[in-house]
Image: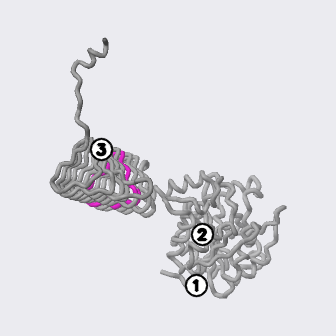
Amino acid sequence: MINNSLKIIILAAGESKRILSSKSKILHTIGGKTILDHVIDNVGKLVNKNNINIVISPKLKQLKKEYKKISFSFQTNPLGTAHAVLSCKNFYSKKNQDILILYADNPFIDKEIINKMVNLKKKNNSDLVLLTVNTNKKNEYGRIVLDKEDKVKKIVEFKDATSDQKRISICNSGIMLFKSEVLKRLIKKIKPKNKKKEYYLTDIIELANENNLKVDYIKSNFLKTLGVNTKQELAIAEENFQNTLRKKFISSGVKLLDPKSVFFNHDTKIGKDVVVEPNVFFGPDVTIKNNVHIKAFSHIEGVKILDNAVIGPFARLRPGTVIGPNSHIGNFVEIKKSNIKKNSKINHLTYLGDTSVGKNVNVGAGVITCNYDGIKKNKTIIEDNVFIGSNASLVAPIKLEKSSIVGAGSVITQSVKEKALAVERNLQKTFPNYRKNRKK
């Protein structure tokens, strides 16, 4: 359900130094989807996109073109999280609204957690609700300091914490929910810290307590609040996301022989009674229907595979390909932008590109379509019941009509008529006693 009284600020202006990459950490992918898209999709289940504001640095201005329904604010100088929130002050200027602040590197924050925060705020009439994480795992999150009554006293940044404070297990996720008027009033009072004169949003807790405001908190688990700042954390996030997808597919009836070795994309769709052997990779836009068998070491992206097909082992299926019912795509076969109809077999060492294959076609070992002439890609049409012998080369554009046959080892440059046999190769020459004569 959409919450019209909730507005969301996503902080995305960080410099991403620790990710050690030429691109922002929020543009790295988890399961084929950028970290930023994970965040937007998750919060988009709660609010309309016009109630989302993303704070970015000028280096990421191209994002405005990609997310046209979302508003953007610029933090021109990296002066801390509070400064970033202040840069979008017009976004939360109205009264009687809830303002959620989160980070663009939190890919697993979900509507259930946010709803818990909103419900707690409503129940207790809280001015501010923190999302914390209770963990003993080694991390550099800020620590939540509680008073004797279990109330939040302050947040201490890890680098400023004492040795005792670093042992505190309740950590700051960085995610906060405010009454809009409270945020508007307190954000202006935060003072700069350190040599860089940065403004920390975490200082708002002490300000809230000084003003006798009600501060509450709820706990979440470590993975739900994981922030991705390094390649190590990116790997942890990918593993977590893949495990979630694996569990989902197994629960829906997919048989994974070695779940940890199979990698899915966020949009992978799989039907019932599908078997996936070890070391299979699914790229974007893959749909697999029922009773399909994917054998080991296959790489599949941008493909639709229909009922009862068998793929692999060691098959590569590339974007724009449809594999028909009961078809077999075997080992070391690469297929790109091709439509393979039912009951066809392409079992060994073959490349088909820009090809239409009819029903009941048999493609022998080592067959290739020569689809590129150095300027453009050309199409090969193979109609129903065609038989192609081993090591044939089909030079496109070309058409093999119904029930035609291509002899092994042929280089076919002209279309073949229905039921015709096409053979193109020199006659074999045999020299008797050649080995014996060679020794003389």
- Visible in this render: residue 27? yes
**Where's residue 35, x and y in %?**
56, 63
The circle drawn on residue 348 is: 3
Q: Is residue 363 above or below residue 272?
A: above
Going from the N terminus, do you reach mark 3 or mark 2 first?
Answer: 2
Identify the secondary structure beneath mark 3. strand
Badge 1 crowding class, 10 Å Cα cut-off, few under 14, some 14 to 19, many 20 or more, is: few
Disc 3/disc 1 C-alpha distance (Å): 60 Å
Q: Magenta span has 310? A: yes
Q: Magenta span has 362? A: no
Helix, strand or loop for the magenta stretch, by majority: loop
Q: Is residue 60 above or below residue 348?
A: below
Name the foreground residue: 245 vs 405: 405
Name the foreground residue: 116 vs 418: 418
Q: Is residue 56 above or below residue 184?
A: above
The amino acid beneath tag 3 is His
Label 3 vs label 1, nearer the camera: 3
User: Residue pushed farthest right?
Assistant: 195
Specify start and end residues of the magenta stretch as a single range: 301-318
Identify the secondary structure beneath mark 2. strand
Which of the 4 image quarters holds residue 99? Answer: bottom right
Disc 3/disc 2 C-alpha distance (Å): 57 Å
Identify the secondary structure beneath mark 1. loop
The amino acid beneath tag 2 is Ile
User: Residue pushed farthest top?
Assistant: 440
Give the residue displayed 73% in from the left and 61% down from the top.
157
**Where's residue 434, x and y in %?**
26, 19
- Visible in this render: residue 205? no
Disc 1/disc 2 C-alpha distance (Å): 21 Å
Residue bearing mark 1: 5
Residue bearing mark 2: 218
Label 1 vs label 2, nearer the camera: 1
